[in-house]
Each structure stands twice: as structure tokens, then as C-alpha cells.
Image (cartoon, helix red, strand yellow):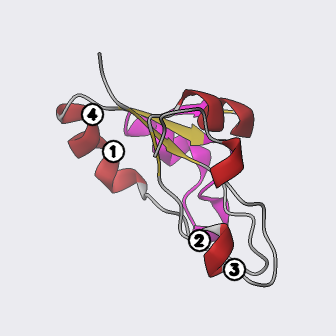
């Protein structure tokens, strides 16, 4: 069974970063991980969806990232963004990190 690494789009106001750039996907895949990325997650950081697909990630909805991932990588958590954004912790599937 492979570990599913999920990358959601950041929701914090004025946040333009993404937690994982396409160049790192091959190393994750080589180690046996599956990488799923929310459609548009890297756009604000200059990484369009096609770059993620070319490196081996699969584009999915936000709901699928949060419900299927074993490990969710994000730039900001709810506690790191006092001005808003959607908290991820309550949306993750049980057992996910």
C-alpha cells in the first residue's frame, strides 16, 4: 500500500505559495508515494496544473485531497493564519496527518 500525499490549494488571504512544487514529485513517487494535487493549487505560485501532471501527480478536487490523503502538506494551518483561511484539521480523514 502506498502513502497518498495530498496538496490542497491554500485558502489564506494573500497566500501565493504552494506546499509542494512539481520538481519534488518524482522523488516522492520513487519512494512509493502517490501524489494528488487540488486543481489550481500551484497556480498563484507560478506552477500550473500541467506541470504537476507531467511530473506524475494526479489532479483532484479539494474534497478528494482531504478525504483520501494519508499526509496533507500545506503552507499555513489555521493557527498560523489569524486573518482567516479554511482550517484543514477538521476536514481530514481519520488517521491522516
- The residue shown at (57%, 72%) is 17
- The residue shown at (68%, 77%) is 15
Closer to the camera in the image, 96 or 12: 96
Percent from the top left, x then y, of residue 49?
59, 45
Q: Quadrant of the N terminus?
A: top left
- Do tag 3 and tag 2 residues touch (Cβ < 8 Å)? yes
Dot 1 crowding, Cα within 10 Å, few <14, some 14–19, many 20+? many
Locate residue 93: give its quadrant: top right
For label 2, the residue is 76
Mark toward the start of the polypeptide (3 vs 2) = 2
Compared across the picture, whether 38 is left or right of 20 comes to right
Identify the secondary structure beneath mark 3. Answer: loop
Residue 54 in magenta? yes
Bounds of the magenta span? 38-59
- Do tag 4 and tag 2 residues touch (Cβ < 8 Å)? no
For label 3, the residue is 81
Dot 4 crowding, Cα within 10 Å, few <14, some 14–19, many 20+? some
Residue 40 seen in this snapshot: no
For label 1, the residue is 25
Give the foreground label among 1 and 3: 3
For label 4, the residue is 29
Query: Image height check: is 39 above or below 20?
Result: above
Query: Image height check: is 91 above or below 31?
Result: below
Amino acid at each position: 500500500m502506498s502513502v497518498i500525499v495530498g496538496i490542497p490549494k491554500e485558502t489564506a488571504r494573500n497566500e501565493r505559495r504552494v506546499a509542494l512544487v512539481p520538481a519534488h514529485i518524482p522523488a516522492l513517487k520513487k519512494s512509493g508515494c502517490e501524489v494528488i494535487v487540488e486543481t489550481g493549487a500551484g497556480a498563484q505560485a507560478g506552477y500550473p496544473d500541467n506541470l504537476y501532471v507531467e511530473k506524475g501527480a494526479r489532479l483532484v478536487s479539494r474534497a478528494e485531497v482531504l478525504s483520501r490523503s494519508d499526509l496533507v502538506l500545506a503552507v499555513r494551518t489555521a493557527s498560523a493564519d489569524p486573518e482567516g483561511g479554511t482550517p484543514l484539521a477538521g476536514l481530514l480523514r481519520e488517521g491522516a496527518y
